[in-house]
Image (cartoon, rainbow, N blue to C red):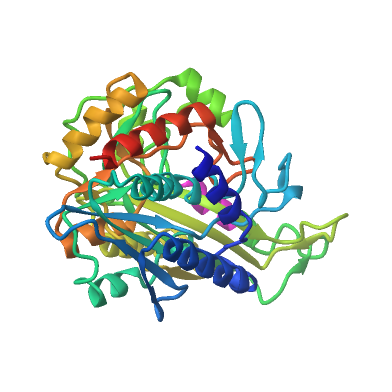
Amino acid sequence: MKTYKLLLQQAIQFRSVSTDSKFLPQIEGMVTWLAETFQKHNFKVERFEGYANPIILASYEINQNAKTCLVYGHYDVQPAEKSEGWDSEPFEVYEDNERLYARGVVDNKGQVLVYIATVFDLINQNKLKYNVKFILEGNEETGSPRIADCIKDHKDKLACDFVMISDGEISGQSPVIELGFRGGANTTLTLKTASNDLHSGIYGGIAPNAANQLAKFLASLYDDQNKITVPNFYDEVDEITETATTFSKEEFEKITGCKAVLNEPEIDPSLQTGLRPSIQVTGIQSGYTGDGYRNGIPAKAVAKINFRLVKSQDPEKILKQFEEYIKKTLPPYVSYTFETTDPYEGIKLDINNEYVHEAEKILEQSFSTKPIRKYSGGGLPIVTLFNELLKVPQVLVPLGNGDCNMHGANENFDKKILQKALDFSEKFFTI
């Protein structure tokens, strides 16, 4: 734990936010720190440029005959300001009796540092079991737009026997082996109903309102059975044959503050997020929202819409279907633009291999309970890329606590869970 906490304090101080270019100097500082830290422990370090933010590959070989583990992580983090509800400075590690708090303490600096700290200690003790490579990128929070090119260009340098990734949460107190992820895309829908905002007294009641039109459209996306209404949306969705994993409504309410679970009828909530698609409105902008009132009818309304799609769905096809739905649903007096980011496919992994079996055995020892196998509702495009390009087994072991507030205020790592994670890492990488 001593090595881990020291590295964590140093890593957290960098505001390595990838969503805002003003933090590029902090990104550079983070990359320099990573390179120097690995070099101090006799790693060979390479810095890959030209793929958005720099990507670090750090390699350590114990001998040519040992198996090689490639550990993936990302050093970029979500934005954070204390004014957003933090009880401490988000880019300084704060510790109380139960938890460590900071932006990135779970997503993902804190999780990948579990392995980095372990490997450093085992090198010093001459007990490291595997040759180890760490690939650390700085654009995961912006969708990893160039990571595929990097993997293709440096495939030989990334050669390994298996991949280890920890970038998620356990289930209650039970460890998890992830079986796959949903794919998806981020999109922006912009509606216009007039050339400019109009006086709500002079034109109110006769002029189309962009905010109203957007609200009507977004409200039409789901029916009262919580199913998506876009025609043919479910045509390629696989029938669920898996049995449900554990889901606690009480734990869900405690963590989220939500008073309802809006799953489709007859589908377990844990399978709903892992094996059913979703369309979520993640942001809306329209009209005046400052102090006081402007009394204008909005001429423009914007929605950020996030798609989560399952393995069998073609993201490009779904986005085309969605745009057709826009055209057919909006009144002719409403113009629109629909912008999309690069979509990525979901994935289901084959976990019948020695590395997953070993991880499951050690997780049960470290957590004193058998790990749960589950599909994650999140998206991790790197898993699909590794599967397609490296074609090696992947061990997906999330280590964060379920109430870690990933992406939110007071992001935290439960110290009891952290200790178990460190114990797992040590046993897994030790001779």
Residue range (magenta): 213-221
Quadrant hosting residue 27: bottom right
Quadrant hosting residue 191: bottom right
Q: Is residue 21 visible?
A: no
Near-viewer residue (403 or 89): 89
Q: Is residue 296 visible?
A: yes
The spot of residue 287 in percent (x, y) is 72, 61
Q: Is residue 116 magenta?
A: no
The spot of residue 245 in percent (x, y) is 29, 25
Q: Residue 47, relative to residue 229: is it above or below?
A: below
Near-viewer residue (29 or 402): 29
Residue at horizontal 41%, vertical 29%?
Answer: 420
Residue at horizontal 36%, vertical 42%?
Answer: 377
Q: Say left or right for 385 vs 19.
A: left
Q: Residue 407, relative to residue 31: is it above or below?
A: above
Quadrant hosting residue 139: bottom left
Near-viewer residue (119 or 273): 119
Residue at horizontal 59%, vertical 32%?
Answer: 99
Farthest residue in the bottom direction?
50
Residue at horizontal 43%, vertical 44%?
Answer: 114
Near-viewer residue (99 or 52): 99
The quarter in which the C terminus is drawn is top left
Farthest residue in the front direction?
125
Q: Say left or right for 418 vs 352.
A: right
The spot of residue 180 in percent (x, y) is 26, 44
Q: Say left or right for 228 vs 360.
A: right
Q: Determine the main secondary structure of the stretch shown in magenta.
A: helix
Q: Is residue 215 magenta?
A: yes
The spot of residue 317 in percent (x, y) is 26, 63
